Amino acid sequence: MTVHRGDPVHGNLIHGIRVNLDQFLHQLLQVLLVGFTIGMMRTVVPALAESEFGVPKNSFMLLTAFVVAFGFVKGTLNFVAGRLSERIGRKKVLLLGWLVAIPIPLLVYYAPSWDWIVAATVLLGINQGLTWSMTQTAKLDITRRDQRGLTIGMNEFSGYVGLALAGIITAYLATTLGARTGLLVFGLTTILLALLLTLLWVKDTLPWAKVEAAKHKAGLSADRLPRYPNNIGTHPTTWEVFSLMSWRDKRMAAICQAGLVEKFVDALVWVFYPVFLYQRGVSLHSIGWIVGVYGFVWGGSQFFTGKLSDHIGRHKPNVWGMLICGSGVAMMLWGEGVAWWSLSAAVSGFGMALLYPNLSAAVADIAHPDWRGSAIGIYRFWRDLGYGIGALGLGVAAHFSGSVQAAFWFVAISMFLSGLLLWIFGEETHPRLNPA
């Protein structure tokens, strides 16, 4: 077994992807199933909201209600998950997330009204906040500092490929089995499999984080130190970490606002892409593929973009990503046809791939291992709150304009402005490129 320079070693605990490959792959499979769970709600449910679940035509605020609920719940649970995982461990939080998910496909199957879909999405928000946070945090626990961009890129690749696959698979299942039965079969299979795999094979990775923190305190790290915030204690309170992330450290605040606004795009793709395309006569299968292109490009490109940031830094890919992603959203309105809409979705997906893993990697760069779990949870709180705030914003824009096109412009302009703020107030966080 090779110990790389800079690997924290304590007993049998060594940091690195290769030496922890078994657990790394288990966690990748977990996040694939997490992506399946949210993906099953993203194509069929919005497209058939009117015919299957009784949402009146052009009821834009009612249509966005389930994503608003999802965003606020998931954001809050990200915050809770990070702090809780530092007390009871990563595996227990992951297990709790899967247990909460069990009723989701049952609620969708028996739903007499849209209120039940909103209730199912509240549970989905709890599930996603607990499980996706833990898969990311666990991988960061067991990998080296110089692998963080690659680690988060692979994590998000797996999750969003799962999301894209689920949207396509459930579109076909809905056509052959019916919307409710298709979602029930797919959902229960995914959730029960994930629960079983967690119980049997996933290890708790909190001990790796403690080893890294202990080595840092002892001054044994051979790595260049990041520019950790100097206005926070060694064992900060929840409020101290929250205020640091939200406004006291301008770098963290710039990252958090960018994370919040980029979720406007995903809220738009979730709610209004299927509606926009369905209104133009696109079949359910083709909608699944167009939205799938967004997910596949986003997921697949992160193999490249996460690793890229380990070499050129996080700041440039993050700013470029915001601008490219916003351009892809605007492109949806500039042309017609499945090929054009697929290209537009691909542009947005590539922009998202540039920024998505690297905003998280930037937080991980400058968050001390003692409170990294909390920092990631708080960043993810603000980021996924963007689902709720974005869905409200695009719902209001569509309601007062009477068309979904206004929602696209709302999101595109928001992305450009947020990217500008990130460029001005952010900085490079990679410790090799901008060390303490």
Image (tube, rainbow, N blue to C red):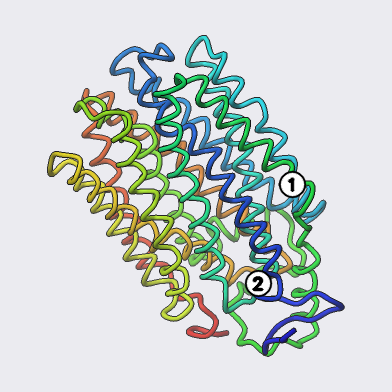
Furthest residue to the right?
A: 11
Give x and y (percent) for residue 228. Answer: 61, 75
Element at badge 2? loop
Q: The N terminus lies in which quarter of the figure?
A: bottom right
Asked if residue 110 is positioned above or below residue 376 in the image, the reply reads above
Answer with left or right where residue 185 lies relative to residue 60.
Answer: right
Give x and y (percent) for residue 314. Answer: 44, 72
**Type of amino acid at the residue the image marks with label 1:** Val
Asked if residue 413 is positioned above or below residue 27 in the image, the reply reads above
Answer with left or right where residue 418 lies relative to residue 156.
Answer: left
* Sooner in the amino-acid sequence: mark 2 or mark 1: 1
In this figure, which residue is indicated by the disc labeled 1?
Answer: 93
Answer with left or right where residue 220 lies relative to residue 158.
Answer: right
Furthest residue to the left?
A: 335
Q: Which residue is drawn at 39% across and 49% down?
A: 295
Q: Which residue is drawn at 48% across and 27% down?
A: 66
Q: Residue at x 52, y 16 (%)?
A: 115
**Type of amino acid at the residue the image marks with label 2:** Thr
Answer with left or right where residue 25 lies relative to residue 3.
Answer: left
In this figure, which residue is indicated by the disc labeled 2?
Answer: 143
Give x and y (percent) for residue 318. Answer: 39, 65
Mark 2 touching mark 1, by CB under 8 A? no
* Occupied quadrant, residue 96: top right
* Occupied quadrant, residue 191: top right
Asked if residue 220 is positioned above or below residue 205 in the image, the reply reads below
- Which label belongs to residue 120? none
- The residue nearer to you, when weighing 187 against 227, is 187
Give x and y (percent) for residue 234. Answer: 75, 70
Q: How far apart are marks 2 and 1 (CA)?
A: 20 Å
Asked if residue 216 is positioned above or below residue 299 in the image, the reply reads below
Element at badge 1? helix
